[in-house]
Image (cartoon, helix red, strand yellow):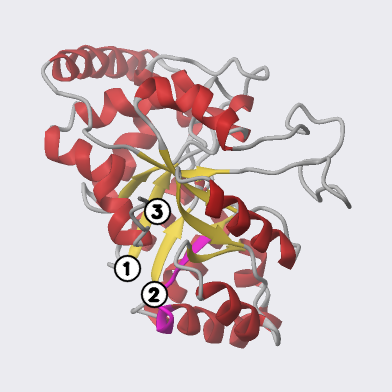
Amino acid sequence: MNRRRFLQTTAAAALLHESVQAAPPATRIIDTHTHFYDPTRPGGVPWPKQGSPLYRTVLPADWLAVAAPHGIKETVIVEASPLVEDNQWILDLAAKEKCIVGFVGHLDPGDAFAGHLKRFAANPIFRGVRWSAAFLQDATKHDAVLDGARLLAKHGLELDLNGGPGYLPQAAKLAADAPDLRVLINHLGASGDPQSLSPEWKDHIRAVAKQPNTFMKVSALAEQVKCEYGKAPRDTAYYLPILDHLWESFGPDRLIYGSNWPVSDKGAPYDVVFKIVDEYFRSKGTEACEKYFWKNSKEAYRWVERK
C-alpha cells in the first residue's frame, strides 16, 4: 500500500470506528452463502477434494457453532455439487433443519433443465440455481442460458452467478435480457485482494450495478486476500477499497450478507469474516445495516419463514 493510500485508509478507519460505536447491530441476520456436505455418504462428494482442509462432514450444527454466538441462526445454502440428486439431499436436510430458510440448487442449463427445475421448484425451500461463469461465456450455450434464465423468472426463482471478473459483462447483458429475473453476483464478482483492485473489475461492477435486477453478495471477502491459510487481515479498513466501491455502485438496497462458510476459513475464522462487514454496515446507519443483513436477501431470494 502506498503512503497516500495508507493515510486515506487510516483516516477512514478512524471515522468507521466512531460511526460503529453509535450504531446498533442488526436485529436479524441471514447468512445467504453456506455449503453443507458429507463426504461419508455413499459415492462421496465431487467437492471439496480429498486432502483439502474442507474435506470433512459439514452440517448445520457445525455452522451454528460458529454463527449462533453472533446471533446468526438462519441461512440460505448454495450448492456447489453438479450432481442433480445432491439438490434433493439438501432439501431433505432442510426438512429437518429449521435454520435453513432457502436453498440455491445446482442445475446446468440444457435439455433436462426444465424438468429438473419443475421438480425442485415444487419445494418452497428451493429458491433458485447457481451457474458457473463458464455457461455465460460459452457461445454454444447462449440460447440454453437465456431460456433457462427466463424459465427461472417464470417460476419466481433467482439466479446466482459465480466466476472470475471477466464474465461480469455477460452477467449484465443476461440481467438486461431477462429483466424479470433476480440476479445475484457471488463473491464480490471476484475482486481479488482489496489493495490491488483492477480498473477492469471496477468498471465491470459499475456495468452490472446499472441493471436494477442485480444484487451483489458481499461474500468471500477475506479469502480473496493473498495470505497464508486463515491469516487474512482482520482490520475492516483493509477491505474498504472493495466495500466502498460496492456501496457506491449498488447502494444500500442491493448488497447482501453471505459468509461462504466453511470455504471462508481459507481467509479467516467466521468471527472475523462477520466482524468486518458488521463494522462496515453498522457505520452506514441502522436502516442500511438491517437491509444488508436480512431485508435485501428477503427481496432477492424470497426465502421462507420457518416455524
Of labels 2 and 1, earlier in sequence is 2
Picture quarter containing residue 284? Answer: top left
Q: Residue at x 42, y 26 (%)?
A: 68
Q: Are marks 2 and 3 in contact (CB under 8 Å)?
A: no
Q: Residues within 10 Å of mark 3 (few under 14, many from 20)?
A: many
How far, Cα to Cα, is label 2 from label 1? 7 Å
Q: Which mark is residue 205?
A: 3
Q: Is residue 239 left or right of residue 264?
A: left
Question: Residue 258, position in %: x, y?
Answer: 44, 41
Picture quarter containing residue 290? Answer: top left
The amino acid type found where label 3 is placed reads: Ile
Magenta part of the protein: which range? 153-160
Q: Residues within 10 Å of mark 1 (few under 14, many from 20)?
A: some
291 over 3 or under it: above or below:
below
How far, Cα to Cα, is label 1 from label 3? 14 Å
Name the residue beneath numbered marker 1. 213
Q: Quadrant of the N terminus?
A: top left
Dot in front, 2 or 3? 2
Name the residue beneath numbered marker 2. 181
